[in-house]
Image (cartoon, helix red, strand yellow):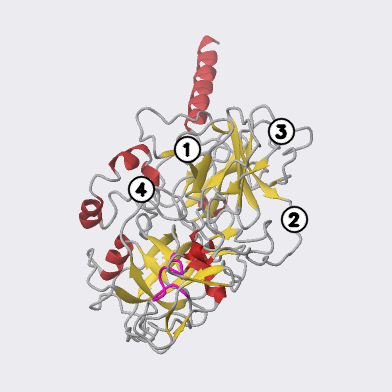
Amino acid sequence: MARILSVVALASLVSVSVQQNCAALFGQCGGTGWSGATCCVDGAQCTYVNDWYSQCLASTGGSPPGGTTSSSSSVSRSSSASSSGGSSSPGGGSPTGGASTYTTTDTATVAPHSQSPYPSIAASSCGSWTLVDNVCCPSYCANDDTSEFCSGCDTCTTPPSADCKSGTMYPEVHHVSSNESWHSSRSTHFGLTSGGACGFGLYGLCTKGSVTANWTDPMLGSTCDAFCTAYPLLCQDPTGTTLRGNFAAPNGDYYTQFWSSLPGALDNYLSCGECMELIQTKPDGSDYAVGEAGYTDPITLEIVDSCPCSANSKWCCGPGADHCGEIDFKYGCPLPADSIHLDLSDIAMGRLQGNGSLTNGVIPTRYRRVPCPKVGNAYIWLRSGGGPYYFALTAVNTNGPGSVTKIEIKSADSDDWVALVHDPNYTSSRPQERYGSWVVPQGAGPFNLPVGIRLTSPTGEQIVNEQAIKTFTPPATGDPNFYYIDIGVQFGQN
């Protein structure tokens, strides 16, 4: 009898041990290159999201897709919760019955509306540029499609003011498929920076130990050592493509857009975090064959910055307004009507030209939008100096469409979600320079710890961690200027 009891006890201990080593509800449990837990705690199932990410979702008795394994069974479930500042569930609290991380669906609606006129402003706000329809535009020679300035010519002109505003010419993209259309274009490069307009910091710049580590690691030097030690997943590429270090700045009217489905009268959508697949083509727009001289592997890149028309009239004013007539390959200048320009990081350009080469300042390319294959959970970069009444943050490493349309926070002693606002400190005449961080609205605090975070994707999916910010003080072992917090959950819808 004693032997039977000891066997039962041993089995219980083994079960507890297995559960302790399995991923929590809404944690990652699989994906190409994933080396963590591949099982889930009781009541959850490891559910395939995409090739790079599988997630533990609540069990309903089904079998996991994609051949994943689990300690119990589940399929994805979505809890409906208010996103308009009210309680997240009847009576307050988490709609998952106490779980601090979960996914839900945005139920808020916004009446469709048009972008408001830009407010009147002094021409001096544009410096050496020209004020057109209350926004800053470049001025260049009308009869010279290589000029960047109005100098040494008889007649000067500006591009249409629409090219200098937030874009209204692009359709709202709420879902991204794996077979989006290709677009012919050209790409330049602009260096390496952690100061892009999106406000991502070292995220997006840093890569370590990639397939091109023989030249990318020396190119970055010690810049990313501490960051990649503290946040190794944020420096790791998905299997089968390079991503980390590949970033881009599109023309400014793509970076800053106006979406009628979102609240706000002006400049209410930023393309920060969107992902593109990019290929170097031959000058005539055709592809190199694998193994052919000039062939390089496609890359995946992330939007982290803006290329404003006002400051970059040669490349970044859009089709028909670009002034790069010296380019002689087929799709160099002007751009095709449905294309955008992508100004690349030196790492992205070096990978496309091969072995870190930056010989050519501009190359012919082909790109398409892709679902983001970022490794790990979503993170927030919490700026230093914050406290209960004011702080700023940026969401990074978000999958699916990649961008975030809304960020909300909740105090530990409240059931109300409060929407953050995009940093309002930008000049209205320069909308394409809008900064991507989100800040606490004036007078909205205090927000007591732990502070909950709710992120909304263009798909309407929301990911939540009700205890995301446990301290405003960065860890003593990390860089206080780059404090990133893993919120423990990732978007699952493309």
Q: Which residue is drawn at the image coordinates 31% and 79% (left, top)?
A: 288
Q: Which numbered disc, 1 or 4, marks the residue closer to the eye?
A: 1
- Give the main secondary structure of the magenta stretch: loop
Q: Earlier in the sequence, mark 1 or mark 2?
A: 2
Nearest to N terminus: mark 1 or mark 4:
4
Mark nearer the N terminus (4 vs 2): 2
Is disc 3 surrounded by few (<14), some (14 to 19) or many (20+) residues within 10 Å? some
Please give the residue where the numbered disc 1 appears in the rendered image. 485
Q: Is residue 308 magenta?
A: yes
**How far from the left and from the top, in percent, is residue 259?**
64, 64
To which residue does mark 3 refer? Answer: 415
Amino acid residing under circle 4 = Cys
Q: Which residue is mark 4?
A: 235
Q: Which residues are magenta?
A: 307-317
In the rendered structure, does residue 444 fall within the stretch colored magenta? no
In the image, is 404 to the left or to the right of 353?
right
Tell me how far mark 1 sits from mark 2, CA to CA. Answer: 29 Å
- Mark 1 to mark 3: distance in Å? 22 Å
